[in-house]
Image (tube, grey):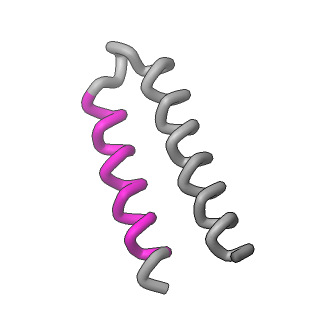
Amino acid sequence: MKKILASLALLILIVNLVLMVLGYLDALVFWGVLGVVALFAFKGLHRIKK
């Protein structure tokens, strides 16, 4: 449960950063954030598997 809340807070933080740089490098940032989120999800799944 704590992990979900932490990841949610991180997501909100990332969204705020994306909104800050919107219209600047929005596409690049969007794919970068998507990659980071995918990495976190993969790490979480890997941890659950163990």
Residue 21 falls in image quadrant = top left
Front in this rendered view, residue 50 or 40: 50
Q: What number of labels is visible?
A: 0
2 lies above or below 20:
below
* Nearer to me, 10 or 24: 10
Q: Residue at x 51, y 42 (%)?
A: 36
What quarter of the picture does the C terminus occupy?
bottom right
Span shown in magenta? 4-20
Quadrant in which residue 22 is drawn: top left
Q: Is residue 29 magenta?
A: no
Q: Position of residue 34 (x, y in %)?
A: 56, 38
Q: Residue at x 44, y 65 (%)?
A: 7
Question: Going by the image, does 15 lie left or right of 31?
Answer: left
39 vs 30, left or right, is right
Q: Position of residue 37 (x, y in %)?
A: 54, 48
Task: Please check the rendered image and state whether residue 19 is part of the magenta-colored stretch, yes or no.
Answer: yes
Q: Residue furthest left?
A: 20
